[in-house]
Image: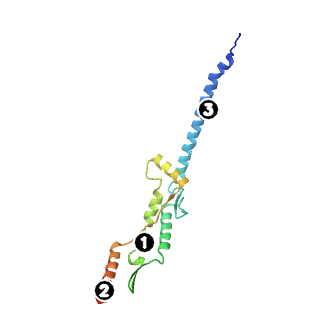
Amino acid sequence: MNTTVSTDSMEDSPKSFAWGKLLFFLTAFVYFSAVIAGLVSVSVINSGRVIMGVQHTGTKLAGMAKDEAEQFFERTGKQKLANRLIRLNYEDRSWTILPEDIHLSAKSAEAAELAYSVGRSGNFLDNMLTQMRCAIFGYAVELEAGYDAELLKQKLQGIATEIHSIAENG
């Protein structure tokens, strides 16, 4: 029985393996470069602006400067608080507390600061990952309101005094 082994295929194998390694490393380099370029471009696009994916009740804030976001929240807060009041009832009496009575107002500066600071509070890599996560999944910023607790306390004490007077005279 005669067996022959071709030396041509043995010689090509190391070359083929070297080309495979080179192709793998070249592909990995291109992929890594594309990821880095993507991260840097996201950072450049978001420079000085609210990042992609940040929104408030469905309104996109992406691309707004911090002062534009604050103006947006001021308008939104005024709309939400317009024609609002607190009505307290006791027996046949009723008391109304208006937003201006207790200095109730939207915390627009705080909401704008939060919207702007998303993706800017960590190191470079953390910020890039946060920015990409927000662009993909979104990030909701809530608008809160604040009031003067002392003014509310005075209003409620006045009402309590009236109720106490009604109970004594009633």
Identity of the residue drawn at 63% across and 28% down = 19
Q: Which residue type carries mark 1? A: Ser
Residue 95 occupies quadrant:
bottom left
Q: Local crowd at mark 3 within 10 Å, few (<14), some, or many (≥20)?
A: few
User: Spatial distance from mark 3 to mark 1, Cα to Cα?
Assistant: 62 Å
Residue 129 numbered tag: none
Q: Residue at x 33, y 75 (%)?
A: 153
Which amino acid, by three-letter code, is at mark 3?
A: Leu
x and y percent of residue 103 in the render?
39, 74
Of badges 1 and 2, nearer the viewer stands 2
- Identify the residue at the far left of this view: 168
Assign a secondary structure to mark 3.
helix
Dot 1, how many residues are within 10 Å of its Cα: few (below 14), some (14-19), or many (20+)? some
Left or right position of 62 against 12: left
Quarter assignment of residue 9: top right
Q: In which quarter of the image is the C terminus?
A: bottom left
Name the spot of residue 134 as percent of width and height, x first.
52, 54
Quadrant in which the N terminus is drawn: top right
Residue at 43 percent of width and 52 percent of height: 121
Which badge, 1 or 2, comes first in the chain's sequence?
1
**In the image, is residue 24 above or below residue 34?**
above
- Mark 2 lies on a secondary structure that is helix
The residue singled out by tag 3 in the image is 23
Location of residue 147 with respect to 112 vertically, above or below: below
Q: Name the residue under label 2.
A: 167
According to the picture, the residue beneath numbered tag 1 turns out to be 105
> Residue 29 or 12: which is nearer the viewer?
12
Q: In this view, does 88 lie above or below 135?
A: below
Does residue 32 appear to the left or right of 6 in the view shown? left
| Proximity of marks 1 and 2: CB atoms separated by less than 8 Å | no
